[in-house]
Image: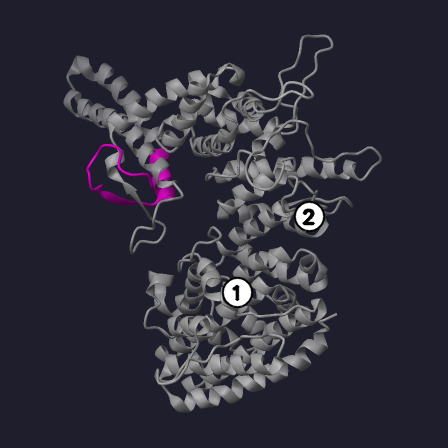
Amino acid sequence: MRPDDGGSSEGVFSGIDPEKLKSTIDSVRRDQGTLRDRASYYKTQLAYWGVGVQELADILKVASWAQAELPMLKRRYHLALNMDNDPYPGFVGMVQINEAQVSRAANTAATKAAKRATELAKKDPEDLSPEEFDELDALFAENYDEYPFAEKVVGALGARKTLQLWDKMSNLDRPSGYGETSDFARADELDEMQKNLSLTVAAATNSDSPEMRKWKKDMVEIGDDPISDPGPAPHGGSGGPEGFIVMSNLMRYGDYDDKFLEDYGTALVKEDKRVMEGADKPYGSGWGTTSTVNHLGNDEGNDPLTGYMKALANSPGAATKFFTAKQKGDDGKVETNFKYLFEERKWPDDSMEGKERVTGRNSMGHALEAATTGHRPGEAATAEDVKHSKEQAGLFSALVKSVSEDQDRLREHGYLSDSFANISAEYMPDLHRALGTDVMYGDKLYPTPGAASRVDKYDAVRFLHAVSRNKEGYDRLNVSQHVYAAALMEAQRNHPDAYPQSTDAAVDDIAYGTGLFQGVIGDGQQFQADKSDAEANARDGAWKEHASLWGGSLVGSTVAIATAPFAGPAGVYAGGLAGTAAGEVFNGILDGFDDDGSKEKEQVYKNVKRADQVERSAILTTQESVRSATGDAAAASRAGDEAGRGFRDSTSLIERTRAAQ
């Protein structure tokens, strides 16, 4: 949230549940007009008799009040959608907004800013002076989430003019002819303009005004059309890039309306299948344009799936619906969008010259994170997030099954492994039940707060083995599993009736499961290190700094999935790990373990090329987990035996699944 713009100097914060507030807004908008019209009618009809005049006047006052308050409610709603908002403490699904930004004066200022921005946006971008370009960019940056700015500007432009605005503006720095140079003075600012326009368009899609309803409908319909206006009849056709190409490059930032994303995605995939089929034919070209459509990241922006995937990563609900939605495949059979994008689609090389070539498929990995976990990548899951829906759990099952059937789907694109490891961290109970042998009561030892994912044992082994062959995938699986086990041991100790066996037996079983899990992923990393002849050093000097980039959210999410079935709706966050077994184990993996501080700390997982060292690290970390969780030296001693047994059993399990082919 940006600093207070003129209200209270300190800023008074309130908690907002965006979904519930939107329902209230819809209700007020619908009912206040009906209330006013009916009250006015009966007041007129009954005035002659003097019946109910005062009562009906009071009703009219209520209707007028509702009409006057509606803009303020809308303003709160739009502020609540800002991705920079923090969760409201103690209330799931609520966010903090600055009430100092909710006033009629602010509403008036946003309306005035929208009028000026619309005037500038409707100009031909080539006619904008450098000062006007800067002014428009600033108006977008400062007002995109200031209701009613976005809906007024974008609604006034309409769908096609919005695309034309960005297409023309994006090409301002291109020379007019061969051998010439551009005299555009703001070439270095086009990336910021793209970002700020994207944020403005995203905010506008969350509006339900008549103009924006039409905008969203039109945008889906013109996605497969060239965006230029048709020329004069009889020969005047339209040209320029397709609508999907331009629009998707305005989806890299912002929180788009879920329903719009779903409708847009359905139309986009349908067109993508047509376009990509043509790419395989003689003279086929697939997606592409001679226009410059992107100034952000490492890709040219010619593949519209890239920007759309980025939008889905910011909208978990829409991401789940998109990947689980079904459309007809090349063979006429119905298939999920997940199957098409992950297994069948040939993602084009759309990289900028000298840049990485993985942006599109990597963005898909981030979108899958959102779709399976219910929150944006890089955020820690709350207790509500880890209550996976049936659709989310089913998508994870499909992901595991797909990688198990053909591990090259992941191994040939190893950069997806960090996303798949992040997803796995929130499905630790499901993976452990798959690896375990307690078919009847496994759900009591490894409980889930929401829907459970069905994963077969050998599928789980092959999936984990494939993910762990990538160093970053291995690191994240390694850390999240140990933290999960430590948190689960502590939870089982505090709730001895949760599992039919004794606490000692529960801890022993978790220790064995930890050894088995660590043996599988350790073999994957060792196998890859041997295959590539790499000097594998899983815990080098940069380890702590590297882990700090993803450790907080990943550890917080892992602890949430371990403790939510026991702790209720309060949720667990990474910041609250101090003094817990999970926190001590995480710090120990980073810094090393010692008994009482009297000797040098023992570092774990220093070299994954040495299977004996990995086994020792798995055993020591498991024992430290047990000691931190239970305070029982005898239990920690037994855990060493159980973890070692599990680690050694992983070898035969891997051989049976032929995971290392």
Residue 426 in the image, given as x and y percentages of width and height:
49, 63
Judged from the image, the secondary structure of the residue bearing numbered disc 1 is helix
Which residue is at 45% across, 20% downward?
Answer: 130
Residue placed furthest toward the right: 282
Identify the image quadrant of residue 628.
Answer: bottom left
Answer left or right for 39 relative to 549. left
Q: On screen, 640 above or below 315?
A: below
Figure disc tally: 2
| Real-space CA distance between mark 2 and mark 1, rounded to the nearest whole angstrom | 27 Å
Q: In what quadrant of the picture does the N terminus appear?
A: top left
Which residue is at the front of the view, 313 or 522? 522
| Quarter of the C terminus within the rendering | bottom right
Q: Which mark is residue 340?
A: 2
Residue 251 position within the rendered picture, expressed as x and y whole percent measured from the top left: 53, 37
Q: Position of residue 102 (x, y in %)?
A: 26, 33
Q: What kind of element bears circle 2?
A: helix
The three-letter amino acid code for the residue at tag 2 is Tyr
Q: Which residues lie in the magenta part?
A: 1-27
